[in-house]
Amino acid sequence: MFLPFRRAILCVLLVLGSGVSCDKLKKKAPEASKPGAVPEIVDEPADATPAPLPAPLDPAVPELTVNKSAQVAILGYHEFVKGKSGNQMHLNIDRFREQMQALEDARVTVISMKDFLAWRRGEKDIPDPSVVLTMDDGWKSVHTLAFPVLKEFSYPFTLFLYKRFVNGGGRSLTTAEIKEMMAAGAEVGSHSVSHPYRSKIDGMFRKSPEEGEGFLRVEMKDSRQFLEDLLAVKVTTYAYPGGYHSEREQEIGKEAGYEAMFTVNPAKVTWDTPSAAIPRYIIIGNDAKDANFKRAISSRGTSEGDLVKQLLGGEGDAEPLVTTKPLPNATVASRRPMIEVDVSKLEGIDPASIEMKIAGFGKVPAEYDAAEKKIRYLTAETLRGNECQVFVTFKRKSEPKPDLVSWRFYIDLVAHYLPEEPEKLEKATVVEEPVLVEPGAETGPEAVPSTPR
């Protein structure tokens, strides 16, 4: 009974793929002809205009295109030197090149500030994990030493410049050098007018709140206007000098029109990170262990991290600590599947720490069955794409950091439209034909029935 319906589905798919109508796919019944007559061949007229494609189903359901659970490490650099690092902000250029090579070897994607902001707005997807490179102040060595390395690896980067250091002579960047790097893909953000530290800002506020706010508006607004006038670009990002900030700087920064403002707090950036306090890993030049750099590019907690592989079993015959439904890389027919994580092999899970996110939808209200130790969520919205990625985090008492289970499965969109098999088919009544035995033949289990006549 399902064959005609399946043929109809196939017909629809062929129509969408070729633009040919179903009528043209039907075989024309042969007409009766006289003996010896030559059948007439008539060309079918071509359609004047192709039939429009049908509107997509469920237009209100968002596409699964943006990974809202991705993590980004933003690296902050200052001045580069050829010899030994003289202080924390001086980084040997050979070590810088080694770090860039490490990013390539680890297959960590370096994205532009433009793509980072587009991801934050939900307009673009990015790999997980990703890295953003930033250079503070406007040191000439960024152009003479770091820029050739960055071009070698084709890595985008952002210059955070403060007004009084641009064209300042000596070790500062010139307009021509900035524009040369911008022509190669560099972006520009503001770093204030005079690079004031917290003590200077607090001193202005001690005089009066009005004087302090006026000082901050000059530092944050004038620097942006200066760069936009000088370089003919729109400036939407700001790096707090020294990383120091409070609610007053955040509010005035928003008033100045900045889309993102950056600190020096070493942490990964997530979808939910406040735009007025985005963390950065400042790379310390005289740290022989490169601790900040290593923490920044660690994949722990990302969808490609070692911990995820450990929890899900990883390579070879390792036994998984958790199991999922659907299984990783499995294909399901339902567009509203039950998503489940079995954590019964783990101890000390804090139920309040459990959080589930689905790419394209963000956080969803998953439930935890303490008796079965399973995390479940029945998809509330129809999945329109053919791929679904899930991220589940939780905290164990024995672990210093949260655990992450991340996997993806696929949806068979064609199977969704095919009719479902009945849950129960009524058993047909079978009437056995009598067995005919030749007269005199043996009876019993070895007897062979004769063919009915």
Image (tube, rainbow, N blue to C red):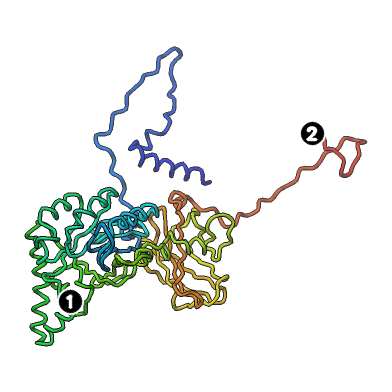
Q: Nearer the viewer, mark 2 or mark 1?
A: 1
Q: Position of residue 187 (x, y in %)?
A: 19, 57
Is residue 361 visible to the viewer in this orientation of the structure?
Answer: no
Tell how many labels. Answer: 2
Q: Considering depth in this image, is 8 or 280 the residue closer to the camera?
A: 280
- From the viewer's perspective, is 379 left or right of 243? right
- From the viewer's perspective, is 190 left or right of 292? left
Secondary structure found at label 2: loop
Dot 2 corresponds to which residue? Answer: 451
Amino acid found under the numbered disc labelled 2: Thr
Dot 2 alpha-carbon crowd within 10 angstroms: few under 14, some 14 to 19, many 20 or more: few
| Image quarter of residue 231 | bottom left
Q: Position of residue 344 (x, y in %)?
A: 57, 71
Dot 1 corresponds to which residue? Answer: 197
- From the viewer's perspective, is 378 left or right of 150? right
Question: Given contact means CB atoms under 8 Å apart, are the residues at marks 2 and 1 in contact?
Answer: no
- From the viewer's perspective, is 262 left or right of 62? left
How far is mark 2 from mark 1, CA to CA?
104 Å
Q: Position of residue 22 (x, y in %)?
A: 38, 37
| Image quarter of residue 92 | bottom left
Amino acid found under the numbered disc labelled 1: Tyr
